[in-house]
Image (cartoon, grey):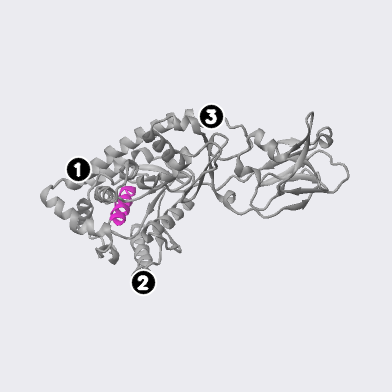
Amino acid sequence: MTALDLHLRQALQPWRTAPAWRIAFSGGLDSSVLLHLLADWARHEQLPPLTAIHVHHGLQSVADDWPEHCAQFCARLDISLQIVKVQVTPGASLEQAARNARYAVFSERLGPGEVLLSAQHRDDQAETLLFRLLRGAGVRGLAAMPASRPLGPGRLVRPLLDCSRAELQAYAQSRGLVWVEDPSNADERFSRNFLRRQVMPLLAERWPQAAASLARGAVHLGEAQLLLNELAEMDLLAARGACAFPWLPLPSLDLAAVTALSDARQRNLLRHWLAPLTRMPDSDHWAGWYDLRDAVADATPIWKLADGELHRADGRLWWLSGDWLKPLRPLELPCAASGEPVELPDNGQVHLSGELAQGRWQLRYRQGGESLQVPGRGRRDLKRLLNEMRVPAFVRLRLPLLFDGDELMAVANLTHAPGIEASGVRLHWSPPIGAQGLSW
């Protein structure tokens, strides 16, 4: 048994009872070695069921031969293989787009508790740290790839992170393994390839343990990020506070609690809070946060980020995304108290409980100038009422209003005119919840 075998078995010991192990199999050196090691282990011991997944991106013509190579490789090892073709949508980074497509496939195909095994190794850690350091990444970006993390309903596990590329290559050559070579890996116009082929060998000449030291540094930075996350969680406890509108299902924080922190802790808190929701800007592009934070009290500033917007209203920060950012279409919807929810275009749903008297009932949105009979207070201007209730500005135009002809009778979730208040009629609105955040 080789040192590589021993290390793999030790790394995967916590996952021996998983329902299944699935291997991310590109056909390259690293994943070929991982698959071969696992297949050999499975011949001698009882392991979770092994299957391989090959994602075919179709980004270059040579890749069309790789699925067949992977199928033959798996057949020799008696390992079941799934081949999944994906369409990669080009963006600012083709590599990132391909990665997103790949991990979407893996996430969709993992069952509850199942484990996806990926073959990243120590040299990958070192190159990633150096690459991101040269791009000016912060602690979060410089932190090591974790040995495991959640992925869909299962886990992503990287059991070879403490092994070098040289160890994997020596194993492959000693076993006569054949793997595919991505020709783009030789193109030094790509920064990662330049680092791998030119910079890392040069560093190793001067410092033979350069890759190991860089990888160890990435682990230390990962621990530092864990501590920053713990600090952010402590700050979140104080900053969540109580929202005056429990029916408004949007992520929000108490602005005063956030601004009471130092600038560095504010940024740490916001990065942590927004990480599942949006890609964050680098440290040179936080002017939008300071503009929002420092705006005068009656202003309605907005910080636009990659996947949504941060608003300030009612003394709180609010995260808006998805339907909340779509233009609202005019609404004139005949209404009856059926008790069944009614979908509103890009604006959640409403339902009306109770029995409406005969009338010309309609659902509409605000146009301006509306007024409402308020129990015990007479007729009040709707704009003033919403100000008194401190309803966030971004909510006001979206509030469903119930009219009988031209007479405003109810504002969803907030107030009802005496004419229907006594009858027990209530207008309930379930607002849109926004986008569900990032998957990876």
Instruction: Reply above or below: 162 against 379.
Output: below
Amino acid type at image mark 1: Ser
The residue under label 3 is 241
The residue under label 2 is 61
Identity of the residue drawn at 29% across and 65% down: 184
Q: Is residue 92 left or right of residue 217?
A: right
Sequence-wise, which precedes: disc 2 or disc 1? 2
Q: Is residue 103 magenta?
A: no
Q: Is residue 175 visible from the viewing direction of this image? A: no
Amino acid type at image mark 3: Gly
Q: Nearer the viewer, mark 3 or mark 2?
A: 3
Identity of the residue furthest to the bottom in this view: 61
Identity of the residue drawn at 57% across and 29% down: 242
Dominant secondary structure of the residues highlighted in magenta in the image: helix
Q: Over which residues does the magenta segment extend?
A: 30-43
Question: How far separated are the C-alphas under marks 2 and 1?
Answer: 38 Å
- Marks 1/3 in contact by CB < 8 Å: the verdict is no
Q: Dot 1, how many residues are within 10 Å of its Cα: few (below 14), some (14-19), or many (20+)?
A: some
The residue under label 1 is 213
Indicate the secondary structure of the residue bearing disc 2: helix
Residue 223 sits in quarter: top left
Q: Dot 2, how many residues are within 10 Å of its Cα: few (below 14), some (14-19), or many (20+)?
A: few
Could you say which is closer to the camera, residue 45 or residue 102?
102
Q: Dot 3, how many residues are within 10 Å of its Cα: few (below 14), some (14-19), or many (20+)?
A: some
Q: Where is residue 129 in the image (x, y as percent from the top left)?
A: 27, 47
Identity of the residue furthest to the right in this view: 358
Q: Position of residue 98 (x, y in %)?
A: 40, 59
Q: Position of residue 429 (x, y in %)?
A: 69, 42
Indicate the secondary structure of the residue bearing disc 3: loop
Q: Where is residue 244 in the image (x, y as percent from the top left)?
A: 61, 32
